[in-house]
């Protein structure tokens, strides 16, 4: 299957700092990418849909000014957690949708964010 | 998108077939069924998908009932590395994935 690279895999930061997470589709172009968050022992929760060249669409309850998404090219989307606080500590996962009509999403390995 | 229901957990003996059921009784005609799995602390891995016909690839087989209201993912010879949470998703192409709670499969030596 297609490969999606997510970086960094783990980040520890101080409260109040901002953290950027990158998601790249390595062998296909993705006009649409998605960002998820997963708390321990819970399922993945969709945060936002990222479309190349346009503003992201956020799910209800997700603060767009807190979680900045930029999808500047067909292979790269970034998620910036601004002014991170301990409650933002979570596992963040991106996915990229390949271009066929069958809508398969390929996922990155995830980023473990710990805010101290 | 159709709601899916899966058993919360299952065990399977190593080397035996693992059959994971999924109920999607409200599925509409143009919604695909997708299966993913998530091994602890990793991103979900695509397994297989289908619309009406049964499908098979190098990882698994997908059996969809004729009325499309349920499906079964079959891992023909389960190994310890197949221990994971398995998610069944039914949705329209072009839409987002909403993950349920999945089935936690434990393969027992």
Image: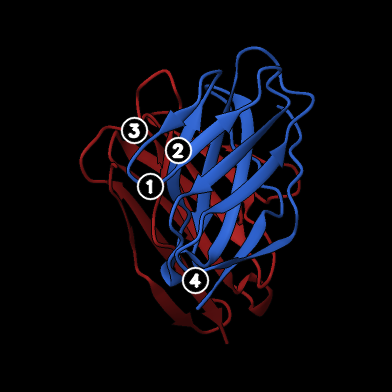
Bin the neighbour count of mark 1 within 10 Å (Cα to Cα): few under 14, some 14-19, many 20 and up: few
Closer-to-camera residue (B92/A37): B92
Mark 2, mark 1: which one is toward the viewer? 1
Chain letter for the residue marked with disc 2 in the picture: B
Q: Earlier in the sequence, mark 2 or mark 1?
A: 2
Chain letter for the residue marked with disc 3 in the picture: A
Q: Quadrant of residue A11?
A: bottom left
Task: State whether residue B97 is above or below residue B76.
Answer: above
Check contact, mark 3 vs mark 1: CB within 8 A.
no
Q: Colour of chain A?
A: red
Q: CA distance from mark 2 to mark 1?
A: 8 Å
Q: Colour of chain B?
A: blue
Q: CA distance from mark 4 to mark 3?
A: 24 Å
How far across and down, in percent of the image, does residue B65 sit?
Answer: 66, 24
| Residue at disc 1, secondary structure | loop
Residue, x 20% and y 40% (percent of image)?
A27
Residue, x 59% and y 33% (percent of image)?
B96
Residue, x 45% and y 50% (percent of image)?
B76
| Residue at disc 2, secondary structure | strand
Mark 3, mark 2: which one is toward the viewer? 2
Q: Quadrant of the N terminus of chain B?
A: top right
Q: Quadrant of residue B68?
A: top right
How far across and down, in percent of the image, does residue A95 sit?
Answer: 44, 46
* Residue denoted by label 2: B48
Bin the neighbour count of mark 4 within 10 Å (Cα to Cα): few under 14, some 14-19, many 20 and up: few
Q: Which mark is residue B41?
A: 4
């Amino acid at each position: 299957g297609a490969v999606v690279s997510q970086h960094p895999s783990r980040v520890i930061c101080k409260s109040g700092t901002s953290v950027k997470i990158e998601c790249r589709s390595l062998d296909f172009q993705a006009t649409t990418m998605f960002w998820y968050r997963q708390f321990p022992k819970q399922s993945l929760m969709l945060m936002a849909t990222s479309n190349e060249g346009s503003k992201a669409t956020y799910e209800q309850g997700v603060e767009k000014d807190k979680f900045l998404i930029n999808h500047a090219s067909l292979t790269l989307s970034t998620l910036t957690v601004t002014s991170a606080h301990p409650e933002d500590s979570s596992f963040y996962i991106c996915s990229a949708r390949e271009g066929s009509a069958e809508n398969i999403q390929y996922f990155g390995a995830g980023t473990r964010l710990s805010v101290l | 998108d159709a709601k899916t229901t899966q058993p919360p957990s299952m065990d399977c003996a190593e080397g035996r077939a693992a059959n994971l059921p999924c109920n999607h009784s409200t599925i509409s005609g143009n919604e695909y069924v997708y299966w993913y799995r998530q091994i602890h602390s990793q991103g979900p891995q695509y397994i297989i998908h289908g619309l009406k016909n049964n499908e098979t690839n190098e990882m698994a087989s997908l059996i969809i009932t004729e009325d499309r209201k349920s499906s079964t993912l079959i891992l023909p010879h389960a190994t310890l590395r197949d221990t994971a949470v398995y998610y069944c998703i039914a949705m329209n192409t072009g839409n987002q994935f909403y993950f349920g709670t999945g089935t936690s499969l434990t393969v027992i030596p």
